[in-house]
Image (cartoon, helix red, strand yellow):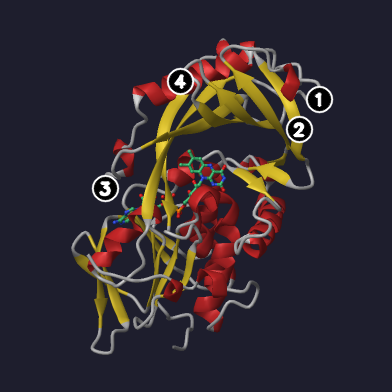
Amino acid sequence: MTVDSDTRIVICGAGAVGASVAYFLSKRGAAPLVVDRARPGAAASGKAAGFLALDWNAGTPVDELARASFRLHGEIADELGADRLAYRRTDALMTAASDEGDLERYRGLPNPGWLDGNVVAHQVIGGRETTAQVHPRLFTECLVEEALTRGGQLEIGVVDGLETDGSGAVTGVSIDGEVTPADVVVLALGPWTSQAQRWLALPQVFGSKGASIVLEADVPAEVVFSEFIGRDGQRRTVEIYPRQDGTVYLNGYGENDPLPDDPDVIEPGDVAWQELQRIAGVHSSVLGDAPLVRKAACYRPLTIDGIPLIGQVPDTPGAYLATAHASWGILLAPATGLMMSEMILDGESTSIDATPFSLSRLPAGRL
Ligand SMILES: Cc1cc2nc3c(=O)[nH]c(=O)nc-3n(C[C@H](O)[C@H](O)[C@H](O)COP(=O)(O)OP(=O)(O)OC[C@H]3O[C@@H](n4cnc5c(N)ncnc54)[C@H](O)[C@@H]3O)c2cc1C
């Protein structure tokens, strides 16, 4: 397919991934239409932690994508303004914490002053060269805004079908029951991508729910991954992310609820967010006293092999998938957007090897 300025490109889903695809396409002169049923960053991309790591995917098929994307985050922050995205480099620490019991045998280094609870610092696991953070909602909104200033469009509506011609090539997208003509369609619907199996044979994408809270507390830029042992003996990894806006984000409590259609009705269970708040207080008196700003939940999009799907849909010219980035969708969004823009505009990804993300590696099916 020849792509020119008249090519109609529709990106379904305005999460971090869809936003990044729109951003990189618009940088090359394309003017995509972005469609979301709620708003940019309405789902996981507005509710994630926003932690970024250069080399934490080392030894996996995602490594090259992660390294490229970590660098692109830095470039985007330079270009658009770090403050606009709340992008900053951060330190990262592993700790051990528990409701009761002496933890000194796990100590590897002195605690930072704000970690004054039943917690011991174990190991430095990231520094300003290799770890960073962004506010995921600001990042997502910002990339969509940039695409719009370059001629892109945003439509709020539910994508509910795909039109193809006799050869199977994409001719349009149905939005709220009305067909918008399209030559290229990118499905970036996160955990909702499986809904597109009603129109296309695709690999299965699942959603894995996680709860989070945001507390009002001003602490240094030290991300904490804490191995926490509860009074009942249950272990979980709680993640604590100080943010530069004077808040602290915590997650680490998974839940098993089915994915609703509307991202705006997703809520954390009471046990999940209350436990996160309680565990925050076990780590730090500052966090224990901090007012709750927000509680939320969101779904990580996952494939059965845990590797994203980035590429053309077999036998459907013009249809692409960019999804299933699991726990690293904010990190991996820019490189995914770059790859997808190259696939659409140049016919192949020239920056990053797309082979590990090919759809054909997994069985495909329809609903
Ligand atoms: C608790 C938690 C913490 C996380 N922390 C991090 C982190 O620190 N770092 C990191 O890199 N990743 C993190 N992640 C993972 C990351 O959030 C996701 O991988 C990423 O947000 C997925 O982005 P997406 O654009 O693919 O999907 P989503 O953000 O889910 O976006 C999909 C969009 O599609 C829209 N949509 C759905 N159905 C339709 C339809 N029919 N028509 C139109 N629009 C539709 C939705 O409204 C939504 O806006 C975290 C995830 C969770 C749950």
Q: Residue at x 49, y 25 (%)?
A: 234
Answer yes or no: disc 3 within 8 Å of ligand 1.
yes
Amino acid type of the residue that numbered disc 2 sits on in the rendered structure: Gln
- Pointer 4 or 2: first along the chain: 2
Answer yes or no: disc 2 within 8 Å of ligand 1.
no
Q: Nearer the viewer, mark 1 or mark 4?
A: 1
Residue 261 numbered tag: 3
Q: Residue at x 55, y 50 (%)?
A: 328
Amino acid type of the residue that numbered disc 4 sits on in the rendered structure: Glu
Residue 42 visible, this orientation: no
- Cα separation between marks 3 and 4: 27 Å
Q: Quadrant of residue 349?
A: bottom right
Find residue 125 and report its horizontal and vertical position in percent: 74, 39
Amino acid type of the residue that numbered disc 1 sits on in the rendered structure: Leu
| Closest to the observer, 13 or 277 | 277
Residue 307 numbered tag: none
- Cα separation between marks 1 and 3: 46 Å
Residue that mark 4 sits on:
275
Residue that mark 2 sits on:
123
Find residue 286 and report its horizontal and vertical position in percent: 63, 13
- Pointer 1 or 3: first along the chain: 1
Residue 109 numbered tag: 1
* Circles 2, 1 touching at the beta carbon (< 8 Å): yes
Q: How dense is the environment of label 3, judged by Cα within 10 Å: few (below 14), some, or many (20 and up)?
A: few
